[in-house]
Amino acid sequence: MFDSLSDKLQRVFKNLRGEGKLTAANMEEALREIRVALLEADVHFKVVKQFIEDVKVKALGEEVLTALSPGQQVVKIVRDELVKMLGTHPSRLRFANEPPTVVLIVGLQGSGKTTSTAKLARFLTKEGNRPQLVSVDVYRPAARHQLSILAKNVATPIYEGTPEETKPLELARSARREAMQSGRDVLLVDTAGRQHIDEQLMTELHELKEALNPTEILFVADAMTGQDAVRSADEFHKRLGITGVILTKMDGDARGGAALSIRSITGQPLKFVGVGEKTDALELFFPDRVASRILGMGDVLSLIDKVQETIDQETAEKMQEKLLGDDFSLEDFRDQIKQLQKLGPLGKLLDMMPQMGPLKELKGAKIDDKEVSRVVAIIDSMTPKERRNHMLINGSRRRRIAKGSGTSVQDVNNLLKQYAQARKMMKSFTGQAGMLGKKLSKMKLPGLPGLPGF
Ligand SMILES: Nc1nc2c(ncn2[C@@H]2O[C@H](COP(=O)(O)OP(=O)(O)O)[C@@H](O)[C@H]2O)c(=O)[nH]1
Ligand SMILES: [Mg+2]
């Protein structure tokens, strides 16, 4: 769905990654490319304009985090703005105080109303509700029959109506009465559609709205129709007042522009997406997940969040100074390993960092809790002097430390070796000011010491 947009955005971020810092010039270039990518994904031009402005203000403003590299900064800003554009919080169905809650399903012909009505019934049942269905599409007998068949499929009662009930309003009223009598708590009303918005349809929908006082009026839009879907959602909203959107056919190869524009244009949230023809192919819409999927950054984003959450900024800064200087002690080593442990399995961490090529061979490495406690115990058994200068630890001290920490001399030797390697590694990272070292220190990762041993 968002493949093409995703590819283009990633190219922009890749280019920025090579830059030392964010400047007005390289930002301008990146923003231009992001703008083109969004327009090509069929995002509404007004939405694109606002989006670019917001990203620009943030990127060049005070909110820039010096802890992240330029590429990561922009990814973060774009992600945050995408989430904002998509609606920040997932928007669930609302329920009436007095059951049954009435949900009116509206939209153009062929958009997926009948299918979505059945999908919703199934979804609600799974959530513990007791829905009731009715089709008021009196113009096409086949349409009502279609919902009857789907109702069986999702094991939900449907009000079929009497031969005398030929008007949408009559059918809907009777269906509500039946729902009340049989203790159903949600009435889903599948309405007729037209190829185009016309007066007669609007009048009919208005009457239904007046009579039923629905809690939700969900507009069903076909994602494949791109900007047309957005335009008709907007028109329905202006004329009828909708409370949310179901975007169908997201499993197709639509470019995604509709999903990205609907909220900004109509002011109404995208509540569900249809991702297939079957009745289970309905998903709640989660803005943050969709944004991450669009950016497809192997989750650099969650890494950024995680690093920021986990590592206390101040400790990290102190640590960084140490890493850059020459006084990286065994105590620091111990603290870093503890920090790393907090970040979770190393393999997972590295998975989240697609640009960590040189460290890929460490993928299999694990920081296991036992190993960490052993390291901590050994270092704690040293004297403060020894922790500051490992050269003081001779053979007999090694034996004592092993005894004191309940480990073996070999464990102590291994640890000292890892520590020496870590020091060397840190020096080469930072010393050469190589990209990787810079990246690590910028990200305020604890420097990944001693990795070869873990
Ligand atoms: N691939 C796919 N097809 C869908 C989806 N939703 C509906 N359809 C198909 O779209 C067509 C029209 O759906 P229907 O519910 O009859 O539309 P209505 O005229 O608005 O009631 C049918 O062939 C459905 O199977 C979806 O999310 N994905
Ligand atoms: Mg229909």
Image (cartoon, helix red, strand yellow):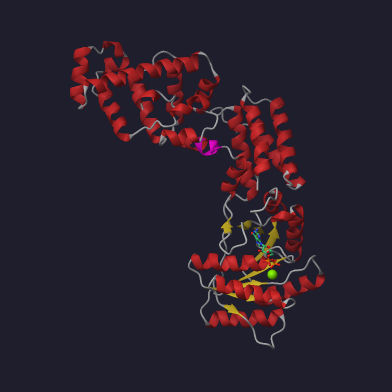
Task: Look at 65% across and 48% down and name the residue there.
Answer: 1
Residue 383 picture location, percent across and down: 24, 18
Q: Is residue 237 above or below residue 154?
A: above
When asked about the image quadrant of residue 157, the answer is: bottom right
Q: Is residue 129 above or below residue 328?
A: below
Residue 216 visible somewhere in the drawing:
no
Task: Look at 64% across and 26% down and name the residue there.
Answer: 22
Asked whether 183 falls inside the magenta stretch, the response is no
Magenta part of the protein: which range? 298-303
Query: Front-most of 38 and 357?
Result: 357
Q: Is residue 274 above or below residue 348?
A: below
Q: Tell me which secondary structure the magenta stretch mostly adopts.
A: helix
| Extreme residue in the bottom direction | 164
Q: Is residue 396 left or right of residue 204?
A: left
Q: Is residue 145 left or right of residue 359?
A: right
| Extreme residue in the right direction | 199
Which image quadrant shows ligand 1?
bottom right
Residue 35 picture location, percent across and down: 73, 38
Residue 318 visible somewhere in the drawing:
yes
When asked about the image quadrant of residue 156, the answer is: bottom right
Query: Front-most of 155 and 230?
Result: 155
| Count of numbered labels shown in the rendering | 0
Residue 370 picture location, percent across and down: 29, 33
Residue 249 picture location, percent across and down: 66, 57
Quarter of the rendering occupied by the C terminus: top left
Asked whether 299 falls inside the magenta stretch, the response is yes
Task: Look at 59% across and 36% down and name the residue there.
Answer: 76
